[in-house]
Image (cartoon, rainbow, N blue to C red):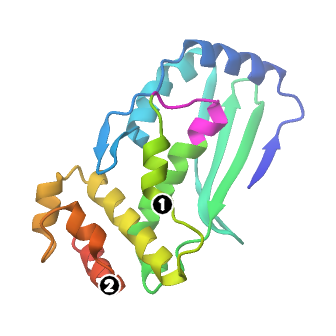
Amino acid sequence: MSFKMSENIDKLATALCKFQAEVEPVLKDAPNHFGKYANLEGVIASIKAPLSEAGLSYHQPPITNSLGCGVLTMIMHTSGQFIATEFAFPVISVPNVNKNCQAQGIILSYYRRYALLGALGLSQTDDDGQTAVDIYVPQDMSKQERDIKNLKKLLYEKIQGLGLSEKDACKRMDGVKNYKDLKEIKDYSKIQIFMSLF
């Protein structure tokens, strides 16, 4: 991760202070199997007007670097002052995922959401504690177990990005009646097949 800024940021800092005082908390209103979260659209809807009123804007082009894929987040002021951060991590090193455009898109949306919230100094309205417990990948897992867990996480994000209910999503996956069934699957290639169905 890297950070850059213009020679001066006094005007940007003043505007950012005004923005942070005026913006409403980002609501977690998009459903997923962990509960609710603030999707990228919700974050943008919450910040768009207050940013404009403070003379601020943002830009988030995708990037690739030695770490992998990610996003550059620039917060810009009408004066020309800016701050910029890069947020990138390796793509899961398993067959086909690096070539899967939809998987890359899910990852980039995830990075954009968290990078934008971080750059603007914002948080979401409710606690991420349980979600963090549910999606945490322990380091003592084998690489294969971590890859399977990460691929399932991408699959869940892909499903919720399409706005599908658990019931509708499971109808597409042979032998899966609910997310509990999906959680029990340990066959990586089967999960890859499921990824291709959405």
Magenta stretch containing residue 119, yes or no?
yes
Residue beneath disc 2: 187
Quadrant of the snapshot with the C terminus: bottom left
Magenta stretch: give its range: 116-125
Would you place residue 104 above or below residue 135 in this image? below
Q: Amino acid at mark 1?
A: Ile
Q: Quadrant of residue 89?
A: bottom right
Quadrant of the snapshot with the N terminus: bottom right
**The one of 56 and 149 positioned closer to us in this rendering:** 149
Disc assigned to residue 107: 1
Q: Quadrant of residue 51?
A: top right
> At 39% across and 34% down in the image, what residue appears?
42
Residue found farthest to the front: 140
Q: Does dot 1 land on a helix, a strand or a loop?
A: helix
Would you place residue 82 above or below residue 134 in this image? above
Which x, y percent locates residue 102?
A: 37, 67
- First in sequence: mark 1 or mark 2? 1
- Judged left or right of residue 111, residue 97 is left
Disc assigned to residue 28: none
Q: Amino acid at mark 2?
A: Asp
**The one of 66 and 191 positioned closer to us in this rendering:** 191
Does the rendering let one see residue 23? yes
Would you place residue 112 above or below residue 46 in this image? below
Q: Quadrant of residue 172?
A: bottom left
Does the rendering let one see residue 101? no
Which x, y percent locates residue 177?
A: 12, 66
Q: Does dot 2 land on a helix, a strand or a loop?
A: loop
